[in-house]
Image (cartoon, rainbow, N blue to C red):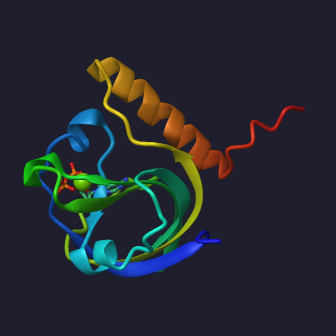
Amino acid sequence: AILPYRFEGEVVRGFGRGGKELGCPTANMDDAVVNGLPEGLSLGVYYGIAQFEGKEYKMAMSIGWNPQYHNEKKTLEIHLIDYSGSDFYGKRMSAVIQGFIREMKSFSSLDELKAAIAKDIEIARRGTTDQGKL
Ligand code: ADP
Ligand code: MG
């Protein structure tokens, strides 16, 4: 099995679009991390745990194609759940991808995208796709 998959790298600048505007900043990982991803790890949204400055955070993460590079460059972006500190460009971060949430798709409206992100974060917070019926 490919998951869990661990990686470590540096947080780089993206285009500063989408993330903070959507209320969901994503720490973009450097090219070495992206290029080192196992082939079988498909594009999509995942959940897991990230470590940064000695602390652990649950994360929601995406692997996708960057439209700014005409979809020829992959990006790996991590949203740390319950992190509310200053920007940390250039810092090292490690993470373990634990599970797959959904495939990437384009949404017909910003509201739909925001709703999907909120759901992704809820799943990532729970740390499982299991609905956990009681
Ligand atoms: P960029 O396009 O440069 O990635 P974003 O709007 O996605 O810009 O913002 C990402 C940056 O915001 C991260 O690199 C990090 O420095 C900062 N940041 C602040 N809070 C968070 C968070 N909860 N999760 C991820 N990054 C965060
Ligand atoms: Mg980002």
Q: Is residue 100 left or right of residue 9?
A: right
**Quadrant of the rendering where the C terminus is positioned:** top right
- Residue at 25% x, 68% y: name it: 88
Would residue 92 be visible to someone looking at this image?
no
Would residue 47 be visible to someone looking at this image?
yes
- Residue at 67% x, 44% y: name it: 129
Given residues 42 and 16, the one toward you in this image is 42
- Residue at 85% x, 32% y: name it: 133
Given residues 44 and 98, the one toward you in this image is 44
Q: Does 16 appear above or below 33?
A: above
The x, y position of residue 130, in whole percent, is 74, 42
**Quadrant of the rendering where the N terminus is positioned:** bottom right
- The residue furthest front is 40
Ligand 2 found in image quarter: bottom left
The x, y position of residue 6, in whole percent, is 51, 77
Given residues 45 and 115, the one toward you in this image is 45
The x, y position of residue 7, in whole percent, is 44, 79
The x, y position of residue 97, in whole percent, is 54, 66
Given residues 129 and 66, the one toward you in this image is 66
Q: Is residue 11 left or right of residue 95?
A: left
- Residue at 57% x, 52% y: name it: 100
Q: Does 106 appear above or below 28?
A: above
Q: Is residue 128 left or right of residue 9?
A: right
